[in-house]
Amino acid sequence: MTRICFTTRIDPARADEYKAAHAAVWPEMLAALKSTGWNDYSLFLRPDGLLVGYLICEDFPAAQRAMELQEVNARWQAAMGDFFLAGDDVRPDETFVVLEEVFHLEDQIAATETAG
C-alpha cells in the first residue's frame, strides 16, 4: 500500500459550505471511493482554503482512473466545482498536487529493526 498526500485549494469564503457538504457525503460516493481503492481517505482544511488530502491505496493513478469511470463522481465533481479556485474548465479532482513523502516514522523504525 502507498500513502498519498495531496493539496488543492478552495475558496475560503465558502469553507463552511464545503465542510457541510463533506459532513454528509452521498452514500453512493462513499461506496465508489471505497470500491476504487481510496482507503483511509481524509481531508484537512486550513482557514486560507488550503485543502490537504491523505489516503492509502495500491496504485493512486489507477484509483483516480477508476473514480473517473464512476457516474456518481461526475455528479460529485460538478456539485463541488464552485468551491474550488481552479476555474470552470477544470474538475476539482484534476487539481490535486501530490506531495512527495520524505519521512514516515514506522518505516524508519522497521528499517532500523531489520538492520540491527
Image: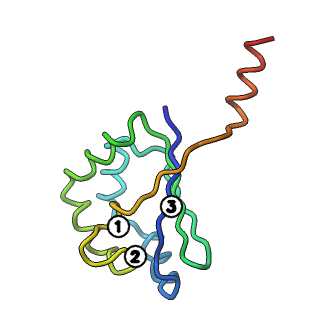
Residue type at mark 2 is: Phe
Pointer 2: residues within 10 angstroms few (<14), some, or many (20+)?
A: many
User: Split into 4 quadrants, where in the image is the C terminus?
Assistant: top right
The numbered dot on residue 7 is 3
Disc 1, disc 2: CB below 8 Å?
Answer: yes
Would residue 102 appear left or right of 67 to someone viewing this image?
right
Q: Secondary structure at mark 2?
A: loop
Q: Earlier in the sequence, mark 1 or mark 3?
A: 3
- Residue 2 to residue 79: above or below: above
Identify the mark at residue 92; answer none if there is no mark: 1
CB within 8 Å, label 3 to label 2: no
Circle on res. 84: 2
Q: Which mark is residue 76?
A: none
What element does badge 1 sit on?
A: helix
Residue 64 shown left or right of residue 49 in the figure: left
Q: Position of residue 75 (x, y in %)?
A: 23, 68
Per the image, label 3 sits on a secondary structure element best described as strand
- The vertical placement of 28 against 2, above or below, is below
In which quarter of the view is residue 112 placed?
Answer: top right
Q: CA distance from mark 3 to mark 2?
A: 12 Å
Mark 1–mark 3 Cα distance, whole angstroms, equals 11 Å
